[in-house]
Amino acid sequence: MSAERLDTLNSWRADWRGLRVAVLGLSVTGFSAADTLAELGAEVLVVTEKAEDEYARLLPVIGARLHVGPLDIVPTELEDFAPEVVVASPGFSPRHPLIVWALENGIALWGDIELAWRVRDKVVRADGTPADWVLVTGTNGKTTTTRLAATMLVAGGLRAAPVGNIGVPVLDAVRDPAGFDVLVVELSSHQLYYLGLQSGPQPVSPWAAVCLNLADDHLEWHGSFAAYRDAKAVVYNHTRVACVYNKADAATRAMVENADVVEGARAIGFDLGVPGPSDLGVVDGILVDRAFLAERATSALELTTVADLAAENLAAPHVVSNVLAASALARSLHVTPEAIRSALADFTLDPHRIEIVAVADGITWVDDSKATNPHAAASSLAAFPGAVWIVGGLLKGVDIAALVQARGAGAKAAIVIGADRSEIVSAFARHAPAVPLFEVDDAETENVMARVVELAADVAEDGDVVLLAPAAASFDQFASYADRGRRFAEAVTTRIAGQPQGEGSRDDDDAPDAGHPRSS
């Protein structure tokens, strides 16, 4: 297919019939792409290493073909299909053999976000225009900020939904017959990488966009920190109204300064300090907006207070930052401060995000299993200084030494789990040798958290916090970060239930026997 015809495919009502599209991967994202393309009349071949039974049964129903098998080389069926477009699910890295093959053969390479933008006019608003998009990315805080922004927009009277990497494919949202005013789209660096390849005449052009922060993550996928950073920066391209950035993170400011935006788009900063004009920040415990009001040079609008956020378990510093970022996005769409306060009064964090799972015998047990990289874990440790820190898993190519040096020395003790324990143990030996360190080397998933909790209970005292903030992915020992957090909570509950209330959690004369002490 010529590039000229591909350039015409910028509407649901364009002529997609007969377009040969290979969809790589059959997760929820891959299936949504295949389903959309089949509905448009394209010829669809789904190529995947494995397929869930439900999706495999549905593909022939919607009129798509399926190839299941090893993908270390390009399957003959894919070559014979001769796709004109390849739509890659986010799990396919730039160095995957199928991605390399597509690029080398000059085949148009899209992600699901590009496809969704092209067909976003399937359902339009009363004025005939499709929903506006607000884009959210960052190393940490994406999901919380996406949910916060969508909740604020709904409180402001808009039909809005959180979609994308949060779990609901954008393609499902653009095909929803009810339609939306705004889609708040959480984007991973993987999705942004593919979005950065787009070359059509109508690129994704969001109403507003934010990169919350930037730190080492997914380096094994991108190949380098520079490539990861550049993928994240794509979020600001062609923004029309508001580029929201973190004043405390110079990398996000640089992204905005270098972005190719629509003329008139404003840079809106946020952080926990006193805001300047065009910023959101905190003054004497009050979250304020100095960006979206006419008198911003001399005035500010109160959004909420840290005390009110504390009443909703939203006062951890990194969560306050997320609230400010989401508020900036919502204010760009004219949501009132009153609506923002109303939204925050009913908002709760997702499970496994600094979630208090139990308080017993003066010990607070906190599940932040979602802290899957050092940057996220650093925020948790800042919120709970002096905690008994449970750390470890798959480090994804990230060096944890800087986190241990900055925050590890303040821990009361550290309990190390997971496949990459040796790197963490070495980092403590170099940077925090005085911290009591225990290594749980049991590979059995069923036993790991029981042993961790036993160790933590032996170390913790009245007034202490035991914090699960692994700074690593979970897939070495658990099905997901949620599974890891759930097993931690279950182990805590089981231990508490197994001892009389009011009695100590251990015999102080007994040494812990659930791990290997590295220092004392």
Image (spheres, rainbow, N blue to C red):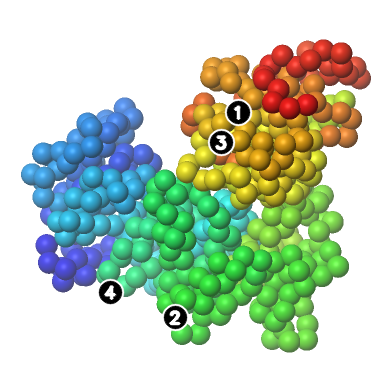
Residue that carries the numbered disc 3 in the rendered image = 423
Q: In the image, what residue occupies the spot 16% across and 68% down?
A: 3
Q: Secondary structure at mark 3?
A: helix
The one nearer the camera, 291 or 107, is 107
Q: Secondary structure at mark 4?
A: loop
Q: Are marks 1 and 3 in contact (CB under 8 Å)?
A: no
Q: In the image, what residue occupies the spot 48% across and 32% down?
A: 475
Q: Residues within 10 Å of mark 2 (few under 14, many from 20)?
A: some
| Picture quarter with the N terminus | bottom left
Residue that carries the numbered disc 1 in the rendered image = 417
Task: Measure how far apart labels 1 and 3 are at the Cα level.
Answer: 11 Å
Relative horizontal placement of residue 170, taking residue 181 as reference (left or right):
left
Q: Residue 39: x, y in percent?
A: 25, 50
* Residue type beneath disc 4: Pro
The one nearer the camera, 406 or 287, is 406
* Residue type beneath disc 3: Glu
Task: Measure how far apart labels 2 and 3 are at the Cα level.
Answer: 45 Å
Q: In the image, what residue occupies the spot 58% across and 18% down?
A: 442
Q: Is residue 503 above or below residue 31?
A: above
Q: Nearer the viewer, mark 3 or mark 4?
A: 3
* Residue type beneath disc 2: Val
* Residue type beneath disc 1: Ile
Where residue 262 is drawn, which disc sits there?
2
Q: In the image, what residue occupies the spot 53% across and 19% down?
A: 443
Q: Nearer the viewer, mark 2 or mark 3?
A: 3
Q: Is residue 313 above or below residue 1?
A: above
